[in-house]
Image (tube, helix red, strand yellow):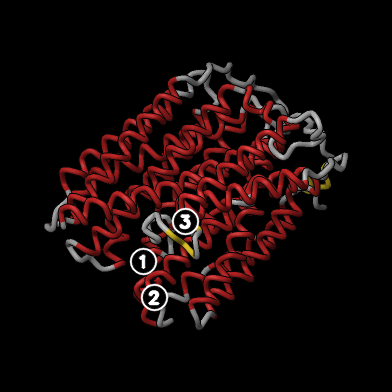
Amino acid sequence: MYALCIGFFMTLLDTTIVNVALPSMITDLNASLNDVIWVVSAYLLAFAVPLLLTGRLGDRYGPKRLYGIGLVLFIAASLACGLSTTADALIAARVFQGLGAAAMTPQTMAFITHLFPPVKRGAALGMWGSVAGLATVSGPLLGGVLVTHLGWEWIFFVNLPIGVLAVVLLFLWVPDLRPDRAPKFDVLGVVLCCLGLGLLVFGIQNGEHYRWGRVTGPLTIAEIIAAGVLFLALFLLWQASSRNPEPLMPLRIFRNRNFSLGNVANISIGITVTGVFVPLALFLQTVPKLSPLMTGLVTAPASLMSGVVAIFAGRLSNRADAKYLPITGFALMALGIVAMTFLLGDGSQWVLLPSMVALGIGMGLVFSPLTNISTRTLDRSLLGAGSGIYNTSRQFGNVLGSAVTAAVLQVVLAATGDFTSAVRAAFYLLLGVLAVGIAAAFAFQRVAAPPVTDSARASDPGLPVTRPS
């Protein structure tokens, strides 16, 4: 479990750690603003698009093998990122870093659901959720320290010793779950899914950069998004077709009410986390003009509380009434955001700490319980696909949150010239997103708590297990 969490932490950390380093990259690499935006976008795109595919690849070739390949690719790409001397080289390396993250992420949840019995799965998911919470919001703090004292390259070099440790622990401790059959591969589904998600995410992520107009030649952002929607519609039709013997995303998985609602709530938490911390980091360095390090310190309480609370929330998420954990979490996040909208100003920023604490506790109550509730009743044959779908929904939420809040910031800033008002408008938008998350959590179906057994092992997942001697 520790080997898996170490690698998982790195993949999520790199979604946020670069934010505080962007000004240094512009100076050192002689890059434009568009170049450094692509440093962020390239990773998010390469991370989000292949997740459905890599979840199924784990089913076919074994999650340990896919996780190991992704981990090695991520480490090598991190080294390439740190050694980059041009913006183009850094963007290319970030693409490979995202592909490595996409290969690793679905396997972590698949391992948990395969190896832990239902009664112990909540605690394992609690650790998994705490890692997700810590990594998602601790990037600015760690990034601020490294950029201030060592340089932007070290936000990538720091992955090397951690990654090597994760590789060693992977081969020493993690069992080898191997499929007892080789499922057919949905090639057409892969093509349609990657094209659809790639075009849609590109359009949403970069729409504001192109002013929602022409990208190149006659091609516009609206046409790119429409093409993405069309490919995804064709993808869904192919998944439902009786001519498809092994669909990439078996639509019967959405007959599971809690899984379907869990993905709605998962998109909400993805939008909210990105939508809060990107504008807040920009505000803190623009209005009160805090340093990257001080910006990280202001947001650190959210990171700490999220990680601590997620451990205990995960253990409680095995209860039949576990849906009240994410309901409470979403409500606390909304309370924290409302408080922040009134406390934003150019004075002392320590007044934001109570809001950050409420936000962090809320995230901790959402992350791991939401995962456990969403996947607890999935059929084991659907775990790989479910893991890919679930992780895709959160990453899509992250991308959507970044794009939507950026659009709101720029529209309001152009109208008022006041950055504080722009951030407040973005926060108000997030309250509507949190309301959707609360509604989805309320609609969760009650599931009986798993029985306590004497066995320390999970029920047979249908995969032979080769354990290290």
Residue tagged 3:
220
Q: Earlier in the sequence, mark 2 or mark 1?
A: 1
- The Cα–Cα distance between marks 3 and 2, rounded to whole angstroms, is 22 Å
| In the rendered image, the vertical position of residue 55 relative to residue 380, given as above or below | below
* Whole-percent x, y for residue 410 in the image: 27, 55
Residue most extreme to the right = 181
* Whole-percent x, y for residue 328 in the image: 37, 28
Q: Earlier in the sequence, mark 1 or mark 3?
A: 1
Left or right of residue 150: residue 127? right
Q: Specify the amino acid type for callout 2.
A: Ser
Q: Earlier in the sequence, mark 3 or mark 2?
A: 2
Neighbour class for label 2 at 10 Å: few (<14), some, many (≥20)? few
> Could you tell me which residue is drawn at 82 percent across and 34 percent down?
245
Left or right of residue 132: residue 299? left
The mark lying in front, picked from 3 and 2, is 3
Residue tagged 2:
32
- The Cα–Cα distance between marks 1 and 3, rounded to whole angstroms, is 31 Å
| In the rendered image, the vertical position of residue 112 relative to residue 316, given as above or below | below
Q: Residue 150 — which label?
A: none
Residue tagged 1:
20
> Could you tell me which residue is drawn at 52 percent across and 32 percent down?
315
* Whole-percent x, y for residue 205 in the image: 45, 54
Q: Specify the amino acid type for callout 3.
A: Thr
Please name whichever residue, 184 or 339, is drawn nearer the observer in this view of the structure.
Answer: 184
> Could you tell me which residue is drawn at 52 percent across and 74 percent down?
90
Q: Specify the amino acid type for callout 1.
A: Val
Q: Secondary structure at mark 1?
A: helix
